[in-house]
Amino acid sequence: MAIEITVPRLGWSSEEGVFAGWLKQPGETVVQGEPLFALESDKVTMDVESLDSGILQVLAGGPEPGGTVTVGQVLGHLLAQGESVHPARQCASPRARAAARKLGIDIATVSAAPGANRVVEADVLRVGKPRGTQQVVAARLEESFRAPHFYVQADADAEAFVKLRGDLLPILEKRHGVRVTYNDLLVKAAAMALDAMPQLNCYWRDGTIMPFGSVDVSLAVQAGDSLLAPVIRNASKSAIAEIAAARGALVEKCQQRRAVPEDLRGGSMTVSNLGPFGVDRFQAILNPPQPLILAVGRIAKRPVVDGDRIAARTTVPLSLSVDHRVINGVAAAQFLQQIVSLIESPLRLVL
Amino acid sequence: MDRESTFIYRTMRLIRESEEQLARCYARGLIHGACHTYVGQEAVATGVCAHLRPDDAVFSTHRGHGHALAKGLPAAELFAELFGRATGCSRGRGGSMHLFAPETGLMGTSGIVGPCILQAAGAGYAFQLARTDQVAAAFFGDGAVNNGAFHEGLNLAGIWRLPVLFVCENNQFATEVPFTYAAANPDVAARARSYGMAGVQVDGNDVRAVSLAAKAAVERARAGEGPTLIECLTYRTRPHSEGMGDYTYRTREEVSAWRERCPIQRFRATIEDPAALDALDGEVAAEVAAASKSAEEAAWPVAADAAAYVYGVERRVQEPGPGTGREISFVAATLEALDNEMASNPAIFVMGEGIGRRGGNFGTTVGLFAKYGEQRLRDTPIAERGFTGLACGAAMAGARPVVDFMFIDFLNDAFGEIMNQISKMRYMSSGRLKMPVLLRGCIGIGHSAATHHSGSYYSIYSHIPGLRVVVPSSPYDAKGLFTHALRCEDPVLFLEPRELMSAKGPVPAEPYEIPFGKARVVVEGDRVTVAAIGAMVPRAVAAARQLREEGIVVEVIDPRTVSPLDTDAIIASVAKTGRLLIADETFGHCNLGAEIAAQVASEGFDFLDAPVRRISGAHVPTPYSPPLEAAVVPDTAAVTGAIRRLVRE
């Protein structure tokens, strides 16, 4: 008898997830325990293992990768040899189809309400709410805003920093096959600053200050329509080429929605660089429970007072957001000074 | 030669030359449809029209080229019409059988045998009402005299002493059926006695004889002494229609014998100065040649204009809203509207059975007879086809008839007059004839009225282009729509749900209009739309009130007019609710609900969250016994149940 393959309830609170694709081909024999399909939610993609064995039959009109699915939704069947199923066609009203088109939702991924035999507009709108990951992001941002923020800001002279990156680029590309970015150098600078001030490597939990076990730096990454912050581990101890390689792999996973919880978990602070998007300066809100986030602006020539003259210098605006429950103003200022110093005298980043 | 003789000879020659040239053109393929010639009968049209003024009205038949030319239609416009050109007298909308030139008094020729008799009577009624000395003439063949229109039309003209000439061209064949076979009493003129009018039989190929009879008849009519029936014995010497065989029903010998009795040759023989006639011959030949040539060169009508002239231009009017003032009944509301319009427009007159002194079976004209008199509140014999056809002619001649049918089931006896004549006339005349005819009567099932007093039929009449169909459900709507109907240019079928006629509601005292094609949202809601018509409106409102207590907020829309139909309003409501129930008391098969459903499925498809559902009357003639009657008409509970099922879908 055909066994239904349904969307399992995973460890997220939402009733919905994003279908990330089949890991078996239709018609392929699936053995119990083998990864069968991938689901994404709460910024993670998980392989779902088959609970049974059989020949995979994918439901006609089932979800495409990227489509929203609800817990319990039937995705396909596991069949015995020679068996076939003709699942009842699920109807959708014209209004529901129009709403789905408008919202960019695959109507086949929307289920009718219990007891109803037709998907109606209300069902689509329910699915069309911000997707699982986006909901998680929203909840985390709300949590973030509850942390009492303050901000310290400074412009670092980036002449040497830009030159260093320019010098490193061909060398590391040739030697290690990686393209070094400013972000790699900024992650390293943040990690080194934290290493130098371990009293800042901690976070607020239920009224007490708890230490982080290691110095790991998160990097804000745009993946499709969501914001992720994969973690670059032990950045202070890693060479720039290693950081670049780790960063490259993580960004690719995020963009392909293949990031796993391990890639996103932890992190002492976050670096968020909107300079490439033409932003001169901005203030970021914290990525809880981290107490620090460094907002990096556009690296550009700006007028700088040099003695009694005004000179054109390449600078990078930095803004550090701080959780005041954990870190006071002077400590934050010193921390930012550390980073400015590392950017202005960047050789230490590669030594 | 005197003026009359010149007119007679020239006109007969013009008809003959034109017909023979048209026959050639038919053979060349210049004429696209039928071509019925008048060859051999020229003396009839000519002899009668010799005594008509341009402001007298002529109504004619499918064999009408001769009447049109005799009444003054330029030959070029006749040719252009048969050639299907934009300069034709009907702008290419008619062809041989549908010639319109109201500016010359040619009110129209018709492809249906009989209605011209009723229309001439109607024009006579309009002239009588307007107190002019104009007369109307109907030309018809022997084929028409065994038709009900002849009997009803002559009887109406007889009882009302209408200024009309009924000219029967007895050419002895109704297409191919011999009159001697078709008529139990083949003496047509003698039938005049049955209708209390003068009757005379003349040799229809002797133009002097025809002319003498017509002269007397026209004088009688202008003097207010009533109608005349003139039977002209004649013969057409060409086939019924060009291209048709001719000798299955008559012989070559018979046709040849009648050719010998050519009315033109006979007239020519009486004229002492043939040179004058030769000059006229040359003039006519040149005129016909020029007409044919100009028509052949004339422009074709523009395809984009094919739908022009179906309706008059709707005047923009603003409705005031019912307000909260005085409350009067549905019937009182229409009576108020009728009284008000009759006071200001002397062209309005009402016809119907018992609408005079009695004031109408439903009190639709109470008090008006005393105010406006017999001529404007005209009791009729039970002759629905007759007085409906008469209303058509009256409207064509400038009056504004209101026909009160009491029960609309009776109107079905006049179906052809409504479908073929009243509704099409504006279009056929390319907008030159306005047709402000108001047809009213009650509709709907209830009170064991049984099948001949329970019909609605608006679905059938909505199908007809040129006709407006109004179904109000409240006194406020009734007064505003009735007033609008009496001020618009188009024929209106005004249907009054009998179950609602005594219901009261707020109605502003002053005159106001409600435009056609504008629905009313009776109850606002967002969960499901109910489009309800006529008596179903209050049932839908009751259902909505009940369901609101269950949390189902229903929107009720009353289209108010079913042609034009405000589908935009219904679709806008469905855009809000996603669900549509149509409540229409009429039989479901092909009813208005089916049209609404199709429109919404087509234009509002993406708004639908569930199938469009309908509740309709059962597809049976309405039975008498209360339990049987109740079983065929949807009640409030049926509406409520249908809504509950629909919101669950």
Image (cartoon, rainbow, N blue to C red):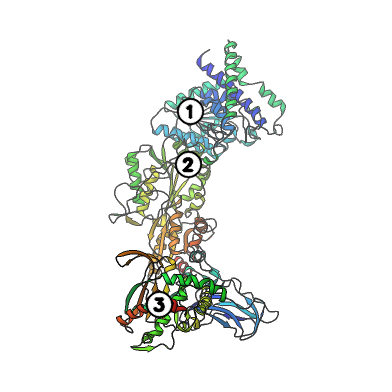
Residue topped by disc 3:
A342
Disc 3 and disc 1 in contact, CB within 8 angstroms: no
Percent x, y for residue A314?
A: 40, 67
Q: Secondary structure at mark 2?
A: helix
Task: Determine the CA span between mark 3 and mark 1.
Answer: 104 Å
Foreground of the two, A147 or B417: A147
**Residue where numbered disc 2 is placed:** B388
Q: Secondary structure at mark 3?
A: helix
B471 lies above or below B83: below
The amino acid sitting under disc 3 is Leu
Q: Residues within 10 Å of mark 3 (few under 14, many from 20)?
A: many
- Neighbour tally class for label 1: few under 14, some 14-19, many 20 plus, Cα within 10 Å: some
Q: Chain of mark 1?
A: B
Q: Is residue A195 left or right of residue A150?
A: right
Apparent side of residue A85 relative to residue B439 in the rendered image (left or right): right
Of B632 and A310, nearer the camera is A310
Q: Which residue is mark 1?
A: B104
